[in-house]
Amino acid sequence: IVLYDPDDCSYELLLDTFFGRVDPLTVNGQGNDRGRQYRTGVYYHSKEQEELARVRFISEQQKYDKRKIASECKQASPFWPAEKYHQQYLEKGGRFNSPQSAEKGNTDTIRCYG
């Protein structure tokens, strides 16, 4: 589970990381993973976060001409973690049995997307 600490990382930096790591045009998936469970999105908890997210989505949309961003921008709702065996996927080696660090500050490219 990833916990967001606004004292450690601004919401703007979180948005930068999101848009730097995902393809926001892909519907229900990233890389070779497909299905609604793989959809991407930005979720906000406050009016301030909502405003920052919506402004950023408008800015990002301008980069893609007529192709529409598929990533969600919605109010956060209750979240239930996946089963324990699904946790720490990258550290366990992902689909290629090649463990990857998930330590704070790691900037390695995520390899689990095919």
Image: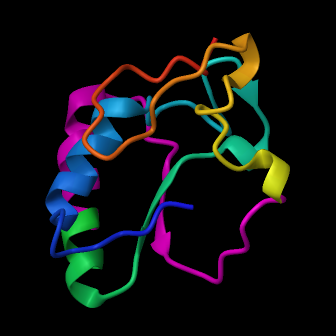
Q: Is residue 8 above or below residue 33?
A: below
For the image, the number of numbered tags is: 0
Q: Nearer the viewer, residue 85 or 76?
A: 85
Name the outermost residue toward the bottom: 47
Q: Residue at x 57, y 61 (%)?
A: 1
Q: Position of residue 20 (x, y in %)?
A: 28, 32
Task: Let me know if residue 109 is in the magenta part.
Answer: no
Q: Position of residue 15 (x, y in %)?
A: 26, 53
Task: Let me know if residue 74 is in the magenta part.
Answer: yes
Q: Position of residue 27 (x, y in %)?
A: 62, 36
In the picture provided, is 2 more to the left or to the right than 106?
A: right
Tell me which corner region of the image, top left, top right, bottom left or bottom right, holds residue 16.
Answer: top left
Q: Is residue 68 above or below residue 108?
A: below
Task: Give, as a single range, the part of the protein colored magenta.
Answer: 54-83
In the picture provided, is 88 more to the left or to the right than 105?
A: right
Quadrant occupied by the C terminus: top right
Q: Residue at x 38, y 19 (%)?
A: 109
In the picture provided, is 43 more to the left or to the right than 39?
A: left
In the picture provided, is 10 more to the left or to the right than 65?
A: left
Q: Residue at x 39, y 84 (%)?
A: 45
Q: Residue at x 25, y 77 (%)?
A: 49
What is the basis of the colouring in this image?
rainbow
Tell me which corner region of the image, top left, top right, bottom left or bottom right, holds residue 93.
Answer: top right
